[in-house]
């Protein structure tokens, strides 16, 4: 599930799908440095074609300076016009390509923005503003995917490796890197970068949110809760904070009512991103698992012979903390044991040598409807069978089973 960022000054990304929402006016906070430019919308004139750009309003005669001035004023179409003129006057001007990429991103003309940044990096692979703009484009504005997140991380990390710029720029690189690594399922790296961002921008809500998410994904629930509690009144972060506090409390005995209240509040604050879990009974869930198992190919069913497939409510802390780094509490399933062909440990245990767990609550939350739930169960089961057969996560991801 994608999350929401806390971009100040005009761009407030929704916690749970941080990539495509126009912020409400109350998200504006002039006290926090913006990590991303505000966004506006430009409708194409004909299908995917855009209206011709207006003539650049460059009163001092310098279109690049005018592009920056218009961009800072929030007039992104004028900024694009002047940046495009600067490019036309000098095709090798890296600064002009960077300004053009930023304006196109702000106007949500993402395919053109990608090309603008590609041209920029062909001229100057270490252009600081371009790296930050491209990292933001791929890590925040474009739809979530491993490919986009990986590019965002690469651009942000390249920016981090350049000679130190001003502290604000370094903080922004660190923050985008934290976002990308959290979305890539690499919370240990995200935590390092979130800490770096907070060192340079103390108490910045986006930094707090990314640090809280990294702690949560590492199953460090007390540390995560401390940061999420600080965000309960934030106009943008509140929905995510309530949601994750609800998930944390769900794991505590006797806290089910309090957990439900937090989760319901998250759904009220951001209904498009925090839905009710798909409502199926434990019996119906088990019946779906049985149907999927019966439909598996003969060779898979043969490999699963004698291997328990257990439906559990949610992952235990023993399973989450059994490896380093710890597993995410939102995992959908888990294969326990050595792959086929590898001998089981000689010592006796109270568990079978090999088993597969499917986590009912997480699967119900990951699905949008009943049909999707069955698909999620099937993909999760195939993923765990892959581990049984000795495939690692990278191989499974390459087969579309991530």
Image: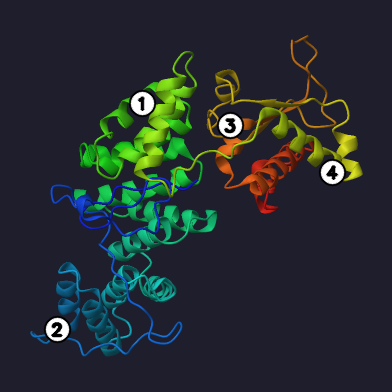
Labels 3 and 2 touching (C-beta < 8 A): no
User: What is the number of the mark on residue 225?
Assistant: 1
Mark 3 vs mark 2, foreground winner is: 3
Q: Look at the image and tell me whether residue 381 can be seen.
A: yes
Mark 1 vs mark 2, foreground winner is: 1
Q: Mark 3 points at which residue?
A: 361
Find the distance from the CA under tag 3 to the CA under tag 2: 59 Å
In terms of secondary structure, where does tag 3 sit?
helix
Q: Where is residue 50 in the image (x, y as percent from the top left)?
A: 37, 85
Figure colour scheme = rainbow
Q: Mark 4 points at which residue?
A: 296
Find the distance from the CA under tag 1 to the CA under tag 2: 51 Å
Residue for point 24% across, 39% down: 234
Q: How crowded is mark 4: few (under 14 residues within 10 Å), some or many (20 or more)?
A: some
Left or right of 227? Residue 183 is: right
Of the residues under marks 4 and 3, which one precedes in the sequence?
4
Q: Mark 2 points at which residue?
A: 62
Find the distance from the CA under tag 4 to the CA under tag 3: 23 Å
In terms of secondary structure, where does tag 1 sit?
helix
Q: How crowded is mark 1: few (under 14 residues within 10 Å), some or many (20 or more)?
A: many
Task: Kindly indicate the quadrant of the structure image that contains residue 178.
Answer: top left
Mark 3 vs mark 1, foreground winner is: 3
In terms of secondary structure, where does tag 2 sit?
loop
């Amino acid at each position: 599930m994608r999350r929401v960022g806390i971009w100040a000054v005009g761009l407030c990304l929704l916690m749970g799908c941080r990539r495509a929402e126009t912020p409400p006016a109350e998200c504006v906070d002039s006290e926090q440095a913006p990590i991303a430019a505000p966004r506006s919308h430009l409708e194409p004139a004909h299908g995917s074609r855009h209206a011709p750009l207006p003539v650049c309003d460059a009163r001092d005669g310098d279109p690049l300076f005018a592009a920056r001035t218009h961009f800072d004023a929030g007039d992104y179409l004028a900024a694009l016009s002047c940046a495009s003129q600067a490019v036309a006057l000098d095709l090798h001007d890296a600064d002009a390509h960077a300004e053009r990429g930023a304006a196109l991103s702000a106007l949500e003309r993402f395919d053109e923005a990608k090309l603008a940044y590609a041209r920029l990096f062909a001229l100057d692979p270490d252009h600081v503003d371009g790296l930050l703009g491209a990292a933001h484009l791929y890590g925040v504005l474009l739809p979530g995917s491993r490919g986009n997140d990986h590019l965002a991380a690469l651009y942000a990390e390249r920016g981090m490796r350049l000679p130190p710029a001003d502290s604000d720029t370094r903080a922004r690189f660190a923050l985008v890197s934290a976002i990308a690594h959290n979305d890539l399922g690499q919370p240990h790296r995200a935590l390092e970068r979130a800490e770096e961002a907070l060192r340079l921008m103390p108490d910045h809500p986006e930094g707090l949110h990314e640090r809280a998410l990294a702690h949560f994904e590492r199953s460090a629930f007390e540390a995560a809760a401390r940061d999420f509690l600080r965000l309960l009144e934030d106009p943008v972060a509140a929905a995510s904070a309530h949601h994750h506090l609800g998930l944390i409390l769900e794991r505590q005995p006797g806290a089910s009512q309090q957990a439900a209240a937090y989760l319901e509040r998250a759904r009220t604050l951001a209904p498009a991103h925090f839905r009710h879990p798909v409502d199926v009974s434990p019996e119906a869930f088990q019946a779906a698992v049985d149907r999927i198992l019966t439909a598996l190919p003969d060779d898979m069913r043969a490999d699963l012979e004698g291997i328990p497939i257990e439906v559990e409510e949610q992952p235990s802390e023993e399973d989450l903390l059994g490896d380093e780094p710890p597993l995410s509490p939102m995992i959908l399933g888990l294969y326990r044991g050595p792959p086929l062909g590898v001998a089981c440990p000689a010592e006796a245990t109270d568990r079978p040598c090999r088993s597969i767990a499917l986590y009912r609550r997480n699967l119900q939350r990951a699905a949008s409807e009943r049909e999707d739930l069955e698909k999620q169960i099937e993909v999760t089961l195939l993923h765990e069978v892959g581990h049984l057969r000795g495939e690692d996560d990278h191989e499974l991801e390459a087969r579309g089973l991530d």
